[in-house]
Image (cartoon, helix red, strand yellow):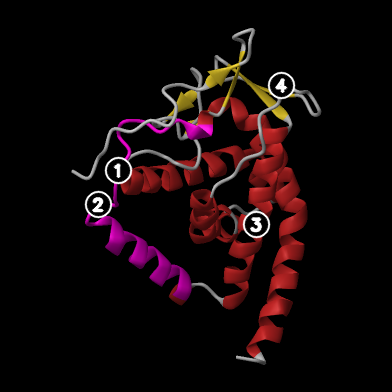
Amino acid sequence: MGVTKRNILAKPRTDPTGKYIYDTHLVIPSTARESWPVLGYPLVIALVYAWYNYLTLDAKLRTIVAAVAFAGIEYNFYSTTIETVDGDILLRPFDPRCRKGHTTWHQFFANIIFTPLLLDIYFAVVPTWPLRVLLFPFNVWLLEIVEGYVLMYLYGYNPAWTYRGTDAYFHNNIKLGYWYFWLGLGAAVELIFPFAVQYTQAAAAALMQYL
């Protein structure tokens, strides 16, 4: 119901050697929906309601900052990496074979809604910094599973990202081979998050004076 068969690209383009691929984000599968399912609307309303009513103002600000930051990270990650036909990612800054920079509004808004799982709740539940860094890949994979399946339910496929390769699981919503990227991100988050809390709390206090 509500599913249309439409492809922008039947498959990703490859370079002349056939070793590297481009435009994976433009591939729209036959499962894509023309519109959200009926229960998709109350689901989104419930998520937005919970975000608005159950997060403090400083936590809301952190979700927006995190979504903006990740959009920049993703765009630059695309533009500095090459993807092989097997789904492997090679970090090759300034290589002309690199993919075009890319991010989506789907991911941006999903990150705003679900970032508390990745950051605030994670820091509250996991007690020590070494454990938080070591477990951060699992934290990201959990977020990708949740976000990915919500987007798949709404759109019939994940319009924000699709991983390729033998290490891609949960309908290509996670890629195990990215563990070292997520480990590095976890180390960066460990350093930055306390400052993000401090500055968003100060910003929230300043905003409350005008609300």
Q: Where is mark 4, residue-wise?
A: 97
Task: State which tag comes first along the sequence, 1 or 3.
Answer: 1
The residue under label 3 is: 68
**Residue type for callout 1:** Arg
Decide if residue 31 is on the left or right side of residue 88: left
Residue at mark 1: 33
| 180 is higher (above) or lower (below) than 56 | above
Query: Residue, x 30% and y 43% (percent of image)?
Result: 33
User: Which mark is drawn over residue 37?
Assistant: 2
Which quarter shows the C terminus?
A: bottom right
Task: Tell me if label 4 and label 1 are in contact, CB under 8 Å.
Answer: no
CA distance separating discs 2 and 3: 28 Å
Q: Which residues are magenta?
A: 25-52
Q: CA distance from mark 3 to mark 4?
A: 26 Å
Question: Toward which corner of the image does residue 149 lie, by quadrant?
Answer: top left
Q: Are marks 2 and 3 in contact (CB under 8 Å)?
A: no
